[in-house]
Image (cartoon, rainbow, N blue to C red):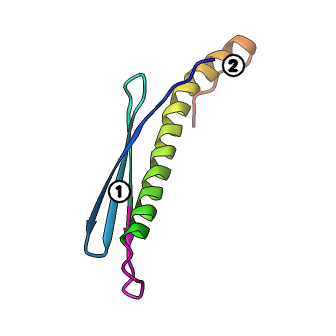
């Protein structure tokens, strides 16, 4: 069994009622992935900075997750196409779209 560890760095910036977060990951093969998140405190809400931090960070991580997934899908797509050609060589090829 192989265990790997990837570390995500998160920078949080607060300005007035706005909180911004940036999540960064560098994969083992050197791919840099980032996600940004933002939270705005309503004037009706109490000033609890941790809530803005959590919301902005959650949004940044969600975007980072989406980007990482898209990177993986792009790497898989050529392999799936090559596999289809091997498994089903007699299918006619049609250009996309």
Q: Position of residue 24 (x, y in %)?
A: 36, 42
Magenta part of the chain: 38-48
Task: Name above or below for residue 70 compared with residue 22.
Answer: above
- Which quadrant of the figure has residue 41? bottom left
- Which quadrant of the figure has residue 82? top right
**Per the image, is 42 magenta?**
yes
The residue lying at 43 percent from left, 24 percent from top is 28
Q: Which label sits in the foreground, 1 or 2?
A: 1
What's the mark number on residue 84? Answer: 2
Residue 89 in view? no
- Compare residues 2 and 40 and report the one nearer the observer: 2
- Asked whether, in this view, residue 72 is left or right of residue 89, the answer is left
Q: Position of residue 72 (x, y in %)?
A: 53, 31
The residue tagged 1 is 21
Residue 31 in view? yes
Q: Secondary structure at mark 1?
A: strand
- Which quadrant of the figure has residue 88? top right
Q: Residues within 10 Å of mark 1 (few under 14, many from 20)?
A: many
């Amino acid at each position: 069994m192989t265990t790997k560890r990837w570390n995500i760095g998160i920078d949080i910036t607060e300005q007035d009622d706005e909180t911004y977060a940036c999540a960064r990951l560098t994969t083992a093969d050197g791919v840099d992935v980032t996600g940004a998140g933002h939270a705005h405190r309503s004037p009706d809400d109490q000033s609890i900075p941790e809530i803005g931090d959590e919301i902005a960070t959650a949004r940044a991580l969600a975007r980072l997750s989406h980007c990482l997934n898209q990177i993986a899908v792009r790497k898989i797509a050529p392999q799936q196409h090559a596999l289809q050609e091997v498994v089903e060589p007699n299918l006619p090829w049609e250009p996309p779209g």
